[in-house]
Image (cartoon, grey):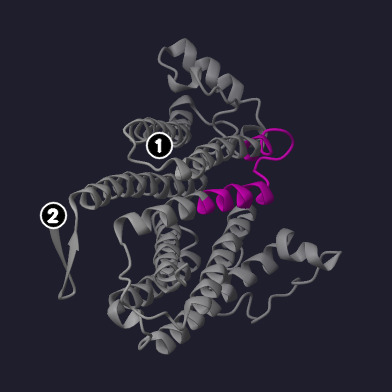
Amino acid sequence: MVILVNSGAKTTVDNGEASHLKDGRAVGIWLAACCLLIFAMIVLGGVTRLTGSGLSMVDWQPISGVIPPISATQWEKEFAAYRESPEYLEINRGMDLNAFKTIFYFEYAHRMLGRFIGIAFLLPFAYFWLRRKINNRDVPRYVIMFILGGFQGLLGWYMVQSGLVDIPHVSQYRLTAHLAAALFIYGYILWMAFPLLCPKRSSLEASSVGGKAMAMMIFIAVTLLSGGFVAGLNAGHAFNTFHLMGGQIIPSGYFSLNPWWKNLFDNIPSVQFNHRYLGILTYIIVCVFILSSWKDNILKYHRWVLSLLLLSVSIQGALGILTLLLHVPVVIATAHQAVGLVVLTVTLYLVYLTRSRS
């Protein structure tokens, strides 16, 4: 028999239940590690895009593509294929082999990390399942995770293909879909990990802000996805001032496309304006949520989470402004994307803490 101490209260747990908790924690740590890898994958994807490396590999070979070019002949063959692409012909004409190797290795690292994530998920899953550390009723959820990971790989190649035909950049629609799938997979796995790593205390009353936390998380996700359209259109380079855009609050040309809804996704001034003000609204919503939730029945025990949310969303906003003012430098723009993911992570944890118990 084991005695657990939780916030001053002693709880008696038999050895079987203690073993189950230990197994659950091991599975939770594995899932959290997968989330860290996906976090790194999303950030590396941002670096790949910002360095103009995403279209350097003009084919997709899931098996043989594991080994990069080694000999001079192999490199020349790879480079010759790239020289036929729209990106080389319209943007990088005259690039030498050494410069090509640099962008190639960024994209290669991105693809290899994706393969590694698949292995890091599949092998531990097989181990935990065979050792009966995962309940059979939960197995379909893990299978769905793996299928989603494979789908994400296909979606990534579908995105790259859009920049290999007629235009030297990927479709902003496919790029945003690729980002949305990554965020969904990340959140799904993290949601599975939370109860295994951070079981909630059954003695606490219900939260009064669970619905607000969910609505806030959805709004934050929409803001992040609007950044996908900014990235896909390179809209961050268009107006490098803040708070005005071209000397105006609402830039000229906001509704220049027909039908009107195309301005939301295809019009550079509109896309950047929308992302800016979604970010500002996100900051306001987070501040209002924190003020209204400070004495919530559950969150009064987790005020550090509210403080972390305020800190991360403040850093995120500052990085977004700096990204604009400094003309989208790789390091700051990458940090902007990474901290955005931190904001989403903290918000998802708040949703977990405040959700109703079933």
Q: Compare marks 1 and 2 and give the one earlier in the sequence.
A: 2
Secondary structure type for disc 2: loop
Mark 1 vs mark 2: give the one in front. Answer: 2
Residue 298, given in percent of the width and then of the height, sits at 35, 79
**Label 2 Cα crowd, 10 Å radius (few <14 / some 14-19 / many 20+):** few
Instruction: From the viewer's side, name the closer residue of 28 and 252.
Output: 28
**Secondary structure under badge 1?**
helix
Amino acid type, label 2 = Met
Asked if 20 appears above or below 312 in the picture, the reply is above
Amino acid type of disc 1?
Phe
Q: Mainly helix, strand or loop, the magenta region? A: helix
| Rendered location of residue 277, percent (x, y) | 59, 76
Location of mark 1 (residue): 121
Question: Magenta stretch?
Answer: 159-184
User: Left of 96 or right of it: where is 233?
Assistant: right
Q: Which residue is mark 2?
A: 1
Q: Residues within 10 Å of mark 1 (few under 14, many from 20)?
A: some
Spatial distance from mark 1 to mark 2, Cα to Cα? 33 Å
